[in-house]
Structure formats: structure tokens, C-alpha cells
Image: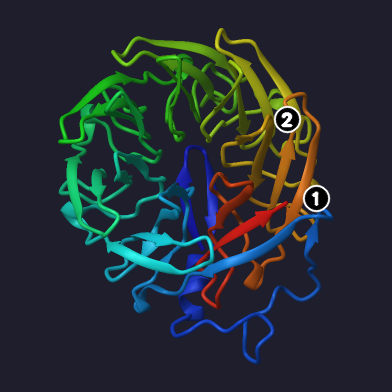
Amino acid sequence: MRILSFGRYALSISLDAALLAGCGGSQLPIGAPGAMQQRAGFVHRMVPGLSYRVLYRFRRHRTGDGTYPFAALIKLNGTLYNTTYGGGANGYGTVFSITTTGTEKVLYSFGGGSDGENPDASLVNMNGMLYGTTSGGSGNGQGTVFSITTSGTEKVLHIFGGSSDGQSPRASLINVNGTLYGTTFAGGANGYGTVFSVTTTGTEKVLYSFAGYADGGSPLASLINVNGALYGTTDEGGGPGCGGFGCGTVFSITTTGAEKLLYSFAGGSDGESPQASLVDVRGTLYGTTYVGGANGHGTVFSVTTTGTEKVLHSFGGGSDGTFPVAGLINAKGTLYGITKSGGANGYGTVFSITTTGTEKVLYSFAGGSDGENPLASLINVNGALYGTTVEGGHRCRCGTVFALTP
């Protein structure tokens, strides 16, 4: 069992079992003799009128394929691009492309060390060039910022130095007027993470160092830009609650580094540990907390840009889903998201929710070849929702790419 440390709540991913299972060679179609099936006793549970399909099942790194796609896909010129946390030629993760019909190609395998390793954030497109981060590697082991072309030419732009420079960037970058902005989970002047800027030529600047406790700390989510101001969440901090770590915060920050705490979660029914980015819908921000809520399984909340927060939905566990670790997306005024676990089979869900809090489970993952444990936000491509699961798929349980179409 591999435990991925994201703040005080860890995600348990069965990587050891996956490596022992082996999954080299070509993939068999579902239903073929010898093909991996969905878990016995589990069924597909889907809202009538939708169609679900697995586009691709990742294989173990000895084949050169990536494994464990933690991040959300992005679309560029009709093709989808993403990263995998592990696998590739060197075992340190990959950048890959995949068509909407399921043709996948590894564009780059990270080499570890100064080249970076273990990307767990999405890419961002700026003028046809892709930019991203690795959470580990570099000469200091603290992570990198890199660029990569759509044909696979990669360049390390910045190596994090730890300490005051920040370390372990876990979130996607965003483009604001030609400059990239991001967060690091740790490091900075106080050790609780940073907000930084970096140019496309690699000039990096720490804009803000979180102080922890009342100020917030350990940001896991990417920032969003709303009318020139940046908004984000921290997994911890905001007060003395939640075991002394603080229950997490929502904050704003200018591109010059003036930060403001907008809301501190109270834990319990209010939710705690926001680990995902926010989404702006007509000037109100919407997000998720990983745990807490009325039932302890996480929440969907709204918060104004002045800090007025409201819990819209508390996940009930069981068929309703548990632990929404990813951010929401807005498609024509309706929000869509995933839960890491729960649902009819216990392997996670895709759900919709209105901005007033009416929630509906659209799909329950069945495990096995169907995929299990989605961690990344969905994307909307011409009305179809595309996403990834970090486990399930082929025999190695190395993850999948899927599409859900109305």
C-alpha cells in the first residue's frame, strides 16, 4: 500500500499490489478470454440517458507506459494531454497525449533527479506550449517547473530549492497575462507552503509564504483568476481546530503578493480540508472539502469573494459517494465533480450539483477494468465529460482515461 501524503489526510493507493500484478503486453478487450473483468458482484450504476466508456487502460512502467494519472486532462487542438505520477521509461512519470477515441502516446518520460519526477498536477497551455510541475526530483528533491512541446521536447525551467523558495508543487499552474502562477505544498519562509510566479523563461519569485495556523498552510490546489485577483484554498490552517492543524481556508492574493484570508473552515458540519481548486460561476466561488460535513464524508460549498460561505451538500457516504478530492467544473451553469470512493460499488462516483445544492450521482465506478478511485477534476469537451481514475483498468490497476456522455 502506497500512502500519498496530502496534508493530514493521506490517500491510500494500492501501488504495491499493482506492481506485483504485472500488466505488460497488449490489452484485451472487455469480455475477451483472459481479460480483466469488473469486480465480481459489482454492477455499473448510471443515470439513464448517459453513456460511459473507458478510453484507455494504463500498463506497468516496464512497457514504457505511464501509471497512475493523478491530474486532470487538458485539451489542445482537439487532443487531450496529461501527466502520470509514475511509470514511463524510467519509472518517474510521464507526459502523454490521448485522442478522444482512445489512441494514447507517451510524449516524455521523466528521468528523475535534476529532470524532475512524479508529476501529479495538470498541464497548462500557453500559446501552444505546455507547462507543468513535478512534485519531486531536482538536485534538491524539491520539485521543478518544466515546459514541453506537444511533440515531446521537454525543458526544466526552475528547480525549487526548498526552504524559503518553496518545495513540492502539487498544483497546476495558471496563466495570467503571460506569467505563470502556482503554489507549493511546503517550504517558504515558514515551512507551510508558498504562492509563486514564474516566467516562461524560468525566472521564479516567491510572492507569499503561508504562516500556518490562523493564516492557513499547505496549499494543494491550483489558483483561479477572477477579474485579476487570484483565489485558492489551503488544506490546513485558519484556526486551532481539527486537531490543532486548522480546518483549512479560502484566500485571495494579488499578482504582487498581497494576500487576504477570506474564510476559515470550522470542521464538523462546516467541512474541513479543502484540497481542490475553486470554480467561478457568475462571481461566486464553488469548491469541495475532502472530509467533514454533516456525515463526515466531505462537502460542496459556495463562498463569495468577500468570504461568505455556505455548505450546499454534505456527502452521505454509501451510494452517494465519499471524499470529493477534486475540484468542480461548470458546464452551462451545472457543476460536475467526482468522489474518490463510495458510490454503488465503493470505487467512486461522478456527480452533478446545481448552484443551489441539488446533487445527483451520475455514475458509480465498478472497479476492475472499469476503473476505480478518481482523483482528478473532469473536463468538458463538446458536451462530453472526460476524466481519469488513478487505479483500476488493466491487471496492474494502473489507472484509466474515461468519457461520460449525455
Q: Position of residue 358 (x, y in %)?
A: 81, 32
Under mark 1, the amino acid is Gly
Image marks 2 and 1: residues in contact by CB distance under 8 Å: no
- Residue 236 placement, left or right of 107: right
Q: Position of residue 307 (x, y in %)?
A: 58, 10
Q: Which mark is residue 386?
A: none
- Residue 14 placement, left or right of 147: right
- Residue 71 placement, left or right of 247: left
Query: Residue at the location (30% across, 55% down)?
Result: 150
- Residue 266 visible in this rendered orientation of the protein: no
Q: Which residue is mark 1?
A: 318
114 or 356: which is nearer to us?
356
Crowd around label 1: few <14 · some 14–19 · many ≥20 (10 Å): some
Query: Residue at the location (50% across, 30% down)?
Result: 235
Q: Work out how far the residue at label 2 is from the one at label 1, CA to CA, in angstroms.
A: 15 Å
Secondary structure at numbered mark 2 = loop
241 or 82: which is nearer to us?
82
Q: Position of residue 139 (x, y in %)?
A: 15, 49
> Which of disc 1 and disc 2 is earlier in sequence?
2
- Residue 326 placement, left or right of 196: right
Query: Residue at the location (73% across, 30% down)?
Result: 293
Crowd around label 2: few <14 · some 14–19 · many ≥20 (10 Å): many
Quadrant in the rendering for residue 50: bottom right
371 or 355: which is nearer to us?
355
Query: Residue at the location (40% across, 15% down)?
Result: 228
Under mark 2, the amino acid is Gly
Q: Which mark is residue 293?
A: 2
Quadrant in the rendering for residue 174: top left
The residue furthest bottom is 33
Secondary structure at numbered mark 1 = helix
